[in-house]
Image: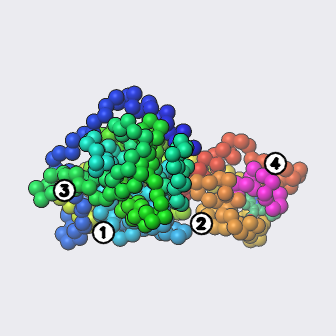
């Protein structure tokens, strides 16, 4: 089924490229893992301008260590510790793992393939048959369908995309006329030798009967009971897939690969893109971060952007305890443009005034209805908590109006307990005007921010 969706994309790609050759891996590769060095704090000229966002960022986030402790950790910790459990997101729990995400590839251990971003895809491992002389071919993606491959015998039936066994989907077709061969499939990966040069080495192999299916880019390996452990071991070795998200685009070949944190380039950092939901004009797949908590404010974003912009792309390693340079930072000129709320709908500016004037009469004072005080100092904190009528829902669930009980009470869908809000003491039914409902819905969708 997946195959049939993919086939046109691959066909289009082959038309566009028309080439059967794999780029020769030569020269040193740029990536080296970076380890943090927390010894000597660097200095930066303090910001002495008047912008209140910059001044606050400078106070709250003087260094990358503060950024990690107060922003990254807060964003990560929520329900179940999202950064830890979400496989598509890296572990950012310690300053060391945070520093290691600088210039490191993104979506490496993605739990689900469909949330991988093309610009995170790396050059895939390569495949060939040991007994044949054709050039090794990049692996787009693979799928191991558990179970024993049925015996096809000589009956003329062929495996298809759902047959138990190992399926490989390749960049180029296998240049063999035969449809079925007994051969040793060999998996090749680039390693760096002593001289720092890239070398392709076979890291795994699998001896079985292979099928060349469809356009011969789909290669199928039979798996019998006795071969099962071997194939599971192969899969567990972590074959790098060049088209991890199976959409026909091999991200690394587009030459637009981005790392998690791109030193000097906040706009081209996957981490920032996941907070925003887009990179440039392109939307980024996956749920918008953070999953569980209040999203970063303008001040938070300013600190993050200035931190990334200040990282020297040429550095051998990065020092998180260096001061973030707000004076040199280009984002200090207009911090408000960094708001994640999009159209500027915030609790304080738009939502609270709507609630105060429409709801405050009943949800305020000494005996607020349903125990919900929308005039209280901490009303914002309160609405992020559970409803009393439907404790399984929060009053406001950032990012999800339909899962926000307060919003449901306003639209009056069938699931609510009691009456649609606001109750009009005269006629009982008086929904908020559409533009106000839209404003509240937009605000929730954009992450339900308190301030701009
Ligand atoms: C005339 C009084 C009145 C007004 C005005 C009013 N409410 Fe209510 N509200 C109530 C009463 C009474 C209840 C409990 C009974 C019910 O839900 O029907 C309630 C319950 C609620 C609940 C359920 C609380 C929970 O924790 O589950 C929410 C949410 C709510 N109101 C939101 C609002 C909002 C938002 C507004 C303004 C747009 C508003 N109400 C306006 C009287 C009012």
Nearer mark to the viewer, of 2 and 1: 1
Q: Residue 215 sits in which quadrant?
A: top left
- Regarding ligand 1, which quadrant of the image does it lie in? bottom right
- Work out whether mark 1 precedes mark 4 in sequence or the reverse, and give the earlier one: 1
Disc 3, SS:
strand
Tell me the distance, in whole angstroms, between the alpha carbons under discs 1 and 4. 55 Å
The residue carrying mark 3 is 192
> What whole-number distance in Å separates the C-alpha atoms at marks 3 and 4?
69 Å
| Image marks 2 and 1: residues in contact by CB distance under 8 Å | no
Image coordinates of residue 268 in percent, x first then y, are 34, 46
Nearer mark to the viewer, of 3 and 4: 3
Q: Nearer the viewer, residue 302 or 233?
A: 233
User: Label 2 to label 4, Cα distance in Å?
Assistant: 26 Å
Q: Quadrant of residue 377?
A: bottom right
Residue ID at (64%, 59%): 396
At mark 2, the secondary structure is helix
Per the rendered image, the range of residues in magenta is: 406-419
* Percent coordinates x, y for residue 266 in the rendering: 34, 49
Read off the residue under disc 2: 381
The mark closer to the camera, 1 or 4, is 1
Ligand 1 under 8 Å from disc 4 Cβ = no
How packed mark 3 is, by other alpha carbons closer than 10 Å (few <14, some 14-19, many 20 or more), is: some
């Amino acid at each position: 089924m997946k195959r049939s969706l993919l086939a046109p994309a691959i066909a289009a790609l082959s038309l566009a490229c028309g080439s059967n050759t794999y780029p020769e891996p030569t020269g040193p590769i740029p990536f080296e893992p970076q380890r943090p060095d927390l010894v000597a704090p660097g200095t930066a000229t303090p910001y002495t301008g008047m912008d209140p966002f910059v001044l606050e960022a400078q106070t709250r986030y003087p260094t990358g260590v503060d950024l990690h402790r107060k922003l990254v950790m807060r964003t990560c910790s929520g329900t179940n510790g999202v950064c830890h459990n979400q496989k598509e997101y890296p572990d950012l729990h310690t300053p060391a793992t945070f520093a290691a995400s600088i210039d490191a590839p993104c979506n490496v251990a993605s739990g689900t393939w469909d949330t991988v971003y093309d610009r995170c895809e790396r050059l895939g491992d390569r495949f060939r048959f040991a007994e044949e002389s054709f050039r090794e071919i990049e692996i787009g993606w693979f799928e191991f369908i558990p179970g024993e491959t049925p015996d096809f015998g000589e009956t003329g039936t062929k495996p298809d995309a759902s047959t138990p066994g190992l399926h490989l989907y390749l960049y180029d077709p296998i240049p063999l006329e035969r449809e079925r061969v007994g051969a040793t499939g060999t998996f090749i990966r680039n390693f760096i030798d002593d001289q720092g040069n890239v070398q392709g080495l076979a890291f795994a192999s699998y001896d079985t009967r292979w099928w060349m299916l469809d356009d011969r880019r789909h290669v199928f390996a039979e798996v019998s009971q006795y071969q099962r452990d071997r194939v599971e071991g192969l899969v567990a070795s972590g074959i790098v897939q060049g088209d991890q998200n199976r959409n026909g685009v091999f991200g690394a070949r587009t030459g637009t690969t981005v790392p998690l944190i791109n030193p000097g380039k906040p706009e081209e950092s996957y981490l920032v893109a996941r907070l925003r939901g887009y990179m440039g004009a392109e939307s980024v797949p996956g749920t918008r971060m953070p999953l569980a908590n209040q999203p970063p404010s303008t001040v938070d974003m300013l600190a993050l952007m200035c931190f990334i912009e200040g990282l020297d792309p040429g550095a051998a390693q990065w020092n998180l305890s260096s001061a973030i340079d707000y004076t040199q930072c280009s984002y200090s000129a207009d911090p408000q443009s960094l708001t994640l709320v999009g159209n500027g709908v915030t609790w304080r500016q738009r939502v609270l005034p709507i609630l105060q004037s429409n709801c405050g009469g009943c949800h305020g004072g000494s005996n607020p209805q349903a125990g919900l005080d929308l005039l209280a100092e901490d009303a914002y904190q309160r609405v992020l908590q559970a409803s009393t009528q439907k404790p399984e829902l929060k009053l406001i669930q950032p990012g999800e109006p339909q899962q926000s009980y307060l919003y449901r009470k306003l639209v009056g869908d069938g699931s609510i307990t009691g009456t649609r809000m606001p109750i009009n003491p005269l006629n009982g039914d008086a929904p908020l005007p559409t533009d106000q409902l839209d404003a509240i819905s937009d605000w929730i969708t954009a992450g339900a921010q308190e301030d701009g």
